[in-house]
Image: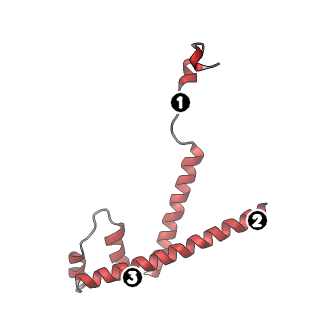
Amino acid sequence: MRADDGTGEWQDWLVDDSESQEVTVGDQQELDQRRGMLKTAMDVLNDRERRIFKARRLSEDTITLEDLSTEFGVSRERIRQIEVRAFEKVQKAVQLAAREVQQDQTALQHLAG
């Protein structure tokens, strides 16, 4: 039955614009995987780098360079340098992990196909 000919049931006119359960689950799995990669990547940081990286890049209420410089007893510029170096380390580790995941997926596809 077509809804535009006036003979359809009211249920035929209902439209569900929400994502399918498969898409929702897939999105959640991808988010979990990304969080896991970030957590693992942060293992390359020492305690000071990790504290600064979290405070400057992952916190909803970003802590100022001034506050961190007081906490660690170094200049704001030094905190900024540590933040940049920590970000580069994490970025490199995440990229490496992503390549490994891609290689694993490619290998699984070859085995399945």
Question: Image quadrant of residue 85?
Answer: bottom left
Q: Which residue is mark 2?
A: 110
Question: Looking at this view, is 12 or 50 the one in front?
Answer: 12
Question: Image quadrant of residue 1?
Answer: top right
Residue at 27% over, 64% down = 61
Mark 2 lies on a secondary structure that is helix
Q: What is the C-alpha distance between the residues marked 1 and 3?
A: 50 Å
Return the mark for residue 99.
Answer: none
Residue at 50% over, 59% down = 31
x, y percent for residue 70: 20, 81
Q: What is the C-alpha distance between the residues marked 2 and 3?
A: 38 Å
Left or right position of 67 against 10: left
Please report whichever mark, 1 or 2, sits nearer to the chain's N-terminal start.
1
Residues at discs 1 and 2 in contact (Cβ within 8 Å): no
Q: Which residue is mark 3?
A: 85
Which quarter shows the C terminus? bottom right
Q: What is the C-alpha distance between the residues marked 1 and 2?
A: 39 Å
x, y percent for residue 42: 45, 75
Depicted 68 relative to depicted 58: above or below: below
What amino acid type should be assigned to the residue bearing mark 2? His
Please report whichever mark, 2 or 3, sits nearer to the chain's N-terminal start.
3
Q: Which residue is mark 1?
A: 15
Residue at 56% over, 50% down = 25
